[in-house]
Amino acid sequence: MGKRAYNFNAGPAALPLEVLERAQAEFTEFQGTGMSIMEMSHRGAVYESVHNEAQERLLKLLGNPSGYKTLFLQGGASTQFAMIPMNLLTAGKTAGYVKTGSWASKAIKEAKLIGEAYTAASTESDKFTRMPSQGEIEVREDAAYVHITSNETIEGTQFAEYPDTGSVPLIADLSSDIFCRPLNIEQFGMIYAGAQKNLGPSGVTVVVAREELLSAEAENIPTVFRYSTHLSNNSLYNTPPSFSIYMVNQTLRWIEEQGGLEGIQAKNEAKAKLLYDAIDGSGGFYRGVAQKGSRSIMNVTFRLGSEELEKAFAKESEQQGFVGLKGHRSVGGLRASIYNAVPRASVEALVDFMGDFMKRNG
Ligand code: PMP
């Protein structure tokens, strides 16, 4: 096999090599069935056992909380931006949105198309370089829920601690940091995440929520957009993205093998520290974008002294086998996405490259 790239893509992103190899081993024939998992009916016992196993592993990593159910949906997190208000932002209610960056802004925009969404807090005046504190978040009495973005993938900020919204359900977009660390699901009414960063390939969106939120009556919206449809059909109302779900199951198994969420967290924090130390120790040659208390351990965003230098960094890093370090086109700068599956060795190689680049350009 050829050398694997130093993959810092923001998503779809690096997957564990072990997961890819296991998938490869059973790619053309799954468990003696004479076909791949992609070729079989989603109504058959073989596929269904994979489907159910993935759900069980998800809930197990969350400590098997009572009253929570998990769904596998399609359309990405972007579809959840619409489905959440369609199902939950009913007439006479409001919904609070914490505006922390690019993704949160998209979620608010969609909710406003559906109902009475308000900005519960915003860090826009700080150029989205930080997450708000508990005291900054307005929780209205008539709020059906408050929505946060756990990790802003583009800006590189992450909640260190989640806000307490009392009896109002907290809903979180965990697309870019799900299972990067232990998660107390009881703090949330609902979480959701596109799989393509920490959970597997693109094509499936995971939702975990309190059953009462998923069973809410929503008869005025099309059947396929109702959570209750997918809940009552075990996410098999229509054809699910079976291969993606199979890959999620494999990735969850890999997380278990890493020592579960505690094990993953220790590795992630160590990787993030390597990078932030390199930035902070560069005497200002590299500058972190996010404020220190809000730094993401998944997406490390940084800048150099000029856009010219940033361009040179992006170009030279690419030549040396580093992929995906250019910041999002909307904000510029540089970004290293160091999701669960990015090996420590890739981060070490990047730190070496950063030191070398600084020596030549500092
Ligand atoms: N929310 C966050 C935090 C994201 O990072 C992304 C994708 N990068 C999305 C939502 C949108 O996800 P999707 O492309 O799966 O719709």
Image (tube, grey):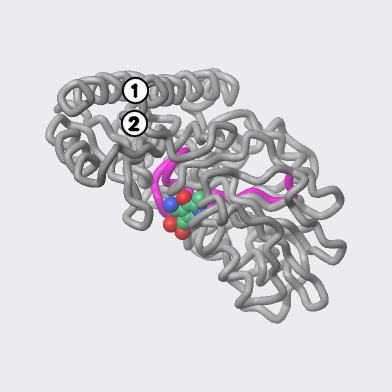
**Magenta region, main secondary structure:** loop
Write down the quadrant of residue 232 in the picture: bottom right
Q: Which of 316 and 197 is in front in this view?
A: 316
Residue 89, x across and y down, in percent:
73, 70
Is 43 situated left or right of 161 in this image? left
The residue that mark 2 highlights is: 286
Residue stretch rendered in magenta on the structure = 188-206
Query: Residue 109, how many percent across, how many down?
Result: 56, 70
Residue drawn 59% across the image and 50% down it: 149
| In-image side of 235 versus 197 (left or right) | right
What residue is shown at x 42% (from left), y 20% (from top)? 277
Q: Which amino acid does label 2 sit on?
A: Tyr
Q: Does dot 2 land on a helix, a strand or a loop?
A: loop
State the residue in front, 270 or 191.
Answer: 270
Locate the N terminus and report the quarter of the image it occupies: top left
Compared to 154, does 219 lie above or below?
below
Where is residue 196? Give x, y as percent: 42, 46
Q: Mark 1 points at which residue?
A: 282
User: Which residue type does callout 1 highlight?
Assistant: Ser
Does residue 41 show up?
A: no
Q: Does the residue labelled 1 lie within 8 Å of ligand 1?
A: no
Residue at 54% of width from left, 32% of height from top? 292
- Regarding residue 65, the answer to whether it shows in the image is yes
Residue sitting at x 57%, y 43%: 130
Check if residue 54 falls in the magenta segment: no
Q: Does the magenta stretch include residue 190?
A: yes
Q: Distance between the residues labelled 2 and 1?
A: 6 Å
Position above or below: 83 against 361: below
Q: Is mark 1 on a helix, strand or loop?
A: loop
Q: How crowded is mark 2: few (under 14 residues within 10 Å), some or many (20 or more)?
A: many
State if disc 1 and disc 2 touch (CB < 8 Å). Answer: yes
Residue 342 picture quarter: top left
